[in-house]
């Protein structure tokens, strides 16, 4: 026994030396993560800062010299596995960490694009991802990289070698649970925590937000987001979410959805984790009279306990699959001579909301897409003013011999005025840059019963364009007034994230294959580059060797080709791919 103990001590001693000795950086600390936005030499968090602003202070690259931005390298994810590439890369200490379709992660040399290591999750048969086999990114802390896989597992890897350090199961993949978001790392009284949600709202799973010890993956707390379910803290039941049956009838809350599939943001100023929650299940809203809390909502959670500080429901009693998962971005709202600790979100339901992030109090909501049908607007209490007849009909009221309720044409479509693709907020212009889509759908309800691992919708739909020349629309929105300052129209639906910089630029990609840059003040297109496949990932920028770099993944896919109805037919010829592209502005031409 003694002999083994000595061996073990020697082995762990070596492991410590290997990750802290010469040539090896110990890795970023929680303080480094909290200061991510201010340090342009690395990109440590999903959102370029945990507040999710996607604003870089780098100003070298601007609308004049961007003509000199050139590709430095491109890396192929390889294999036969392509499909949608929705990741945001992490950049640290000369390395790029990027995830890819089918739950893969790559470590690349940031100067050359050469592969240092790769890890591919061994996915079982029978996984149930609703909306393509995508992954949105990893998280970094110390010597570890974390990411989640489509079989609802979380993995920690040694960031230098790719060696698996631990692996934990979130929930059963054959019940419809999966994972595709970038994990979030937050500080707490007991040290950094790894915070994750889960996917599966189309299968009647129940959404949760969970915090783990990043050292070993052990669960610290779990917070179900649907009322009636019990939370956990330190291995014991903690508190119930809401009050059972307050806004849900019968047993419907037990399979009530609210998937927390997009991950969250963290605001250090209020010490709050913000998570959005998906649609209530099933889609057929006549099965569940009531507000169905906290589906289609934004929640603020206490990092120490997982308790809910406040909730704001964007679509009470949703009947259109208006998931409320879209990112809540913290910012300082300047209005009437005052500065308010605010947060904004552009919801699937077509409205751009501004909330007080200290309390969740409603400040304003304005439509950011055109021709919204389901609501006439948002009232002063923050609740939608529903349009009479805007909800698809009750199948129980169907005409004799019919199984379907009355079909309605609804705008936005269920893929949303905006879907998962993150917007950006410029501290320089004070504007939000929102990747949106202008489209509608025929939607109708049908009868449905819950069956484990089966789609739990009780609805049918066909997505249709509403304008001839475009669906995609990148909009610059003033959060104080809801005014659209400029708009860039794109023929295909936009499905990629946005980046803005102190150089006065806005970047986003198009399904047609271009990475594009716009003047942040005017919307003028100032640069574009064809990456060879559609871009549905989120661009980043960093400084390396005294030069400004821009990186983005390319690879067409995601929910649109799978669910897009008539829209999908118009874009079926786009080529698939799977590349990470890196661009640089050479020093010699930076001033020109
Ligand atoms: Ca959904």
Image (cartoon, rainbow, N blue to C red):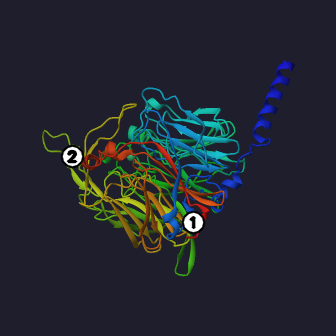
CB of mark 2 near ligand 1 (< 8 Å) = no
Q: Is residue 543 left or right of residue 440?
A: right
Identify the residue under disc 1.
Answer: 589
Within-10-Å neighbours for mark 1: few <14, some 14–19, many 20+: few
Tell me the SS state at disc 1.
helix
In the rendered image, the residue lying farthest to the front is 588
Looking at the rendering, which quadrant does residue 346 occupy?
Answer: bottom left
Which of these two is toward me, 403 or 53? Answer: 53
Identify the residue under disc 2.
Answer: 405
Asked whether the viewer can see residue 427, the reply is: yes
Within-10-Å neighbours for mark 2: few <14, some 14–19, many 20+: many
Looking at the rendering, which quadrant does residue 459 occupy?
Answer: top left
Give the mark nearest the N terminus, 1 or 2.
2
Which of these two is toward me, 530 or 195? Answer: 530
Q: Is residue 1 left or right of residue 520?
A: right
Residue 416 is situated, as x and y percent measured from the top left of the image, at 36, 54
Which of these two is toward me, 294 or 515? Answer: 515
Q: What quarter of the picture does the N terminus occupy? A: top right
CB of mark 1 near ligand 1 (< 8 Å) = no
């Amino acid at each position: 026994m003694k002999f083994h103990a000595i061996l073990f001590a020697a082995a762990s001693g070596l492991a410590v030396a290997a990750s802290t000795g010469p040539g090896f950086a110990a890795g970023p600390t929680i303080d480094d993560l909290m200061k991510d936005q201010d340090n342009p030499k690395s990109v440590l968090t999903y959102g370029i800062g945990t507040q999710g602003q996607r604003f870089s202070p780098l100003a070298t690259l601007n609308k004049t010299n961007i003509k000199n931005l050139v590709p430095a390298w491109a890396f192929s994810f390889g294999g036969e596995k392509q499909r949608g590439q929705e990741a945001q890369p992490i950049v640290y200490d000369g390395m790029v960490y990027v995830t890819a379709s089918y739950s893969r992660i790559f470590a690349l040399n940031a100067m050359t694009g050469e592969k240092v290591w790769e890890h591919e999750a061994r996915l079982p048969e029978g996984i149930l991802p609703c909306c393509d086999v995508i992954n949105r990114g990893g998280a970094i802390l110390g010597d570890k990289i974390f990411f989640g896989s489509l079989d609802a597992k979380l993995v920690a890897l040694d960031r230098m070698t790719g060696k698996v350090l631990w692996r934990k199961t979130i929930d059963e993949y054959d019940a419809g649970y999966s994972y595709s978001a970038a994990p979030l790392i937050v500080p707490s009284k007991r040290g950094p925590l790894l915070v994750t949600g889960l996917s599966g709202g189309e299968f009647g799973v129940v959404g949760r937000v969970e915090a783990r010890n990043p050292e070993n993956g052990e669960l610290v707390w779990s917070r179900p987001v649907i009322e009636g379910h019990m939370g956990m803290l330190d291995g014991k039941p903690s508190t119930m979410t809401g009050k059972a049956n307050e806004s849900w009838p019968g047993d419907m809350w037990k399979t009530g959805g609210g998937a927390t599939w997009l991950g969250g943001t963290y605001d250090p100023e209020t010490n709050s984790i913000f998570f959005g929650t998906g649609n209530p299940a099933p889609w057929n809203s006549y099965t569940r009279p009531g507000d169905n809390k906290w589906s289609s909502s934004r929640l603020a959670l206490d990092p120490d306990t997982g308790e809910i500080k406040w909730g704001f429901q964007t679509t009470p009693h949703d009947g259109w699959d208006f998931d409320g998962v879209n990112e809540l971005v913290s910012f300082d709202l300047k209005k009437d001579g005052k500065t308010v600790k605010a947060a904004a979100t552009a919801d699937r339901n077509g409205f751009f909301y501004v909330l007080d992030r200290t309390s969740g109090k409603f400040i304003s909501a304005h439509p950011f897409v055109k021709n919204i049908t389901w609501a006439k607007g948002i009232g002063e209490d923050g609740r939608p003013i529903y349009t009479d007849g805007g909800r698809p009909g009750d199948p129980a009221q169907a005409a004799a011999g019919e199984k379907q309720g009355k079909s309605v044409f609804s705008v936005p479509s269920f893929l949303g005025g905006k879907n998962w693709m993150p917007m950006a907020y410029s501290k320089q212009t004070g504007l939000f840059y929102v990747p949106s889509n202008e489209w509608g759908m025929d939607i109708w309800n049908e009868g449905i019963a819950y069956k484990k691992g089966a789609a739990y919708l009780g609805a049918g739909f066909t997505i249709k364009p509403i304008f001839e020349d475009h669906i995609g629309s990148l909009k610059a929105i003033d959060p104080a007034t809801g005014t659209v300052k400029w708009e860039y129209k794109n023929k295909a639906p936009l499905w990629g994230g946005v980046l803005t910089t102190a150089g006065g630029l806005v970047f986003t990609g198009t399904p047609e294959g271009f990475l594009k840059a716009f003047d942040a003040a005017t919307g003028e297109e100032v640069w574009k580059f064809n990456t060879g496949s559609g871009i549905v990932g989120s661009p980043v920028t960093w400084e390396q060797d005294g030069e400004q770099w821009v990186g983005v993944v390319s690879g067409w896919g995601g929910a649109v080709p799978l669910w897009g109805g008539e829209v999908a037919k118009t874009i079926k010829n786009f080529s698939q791919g799977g590349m990470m592209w890196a661009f640089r502005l050479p020093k010699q031409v930076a001033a020109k």
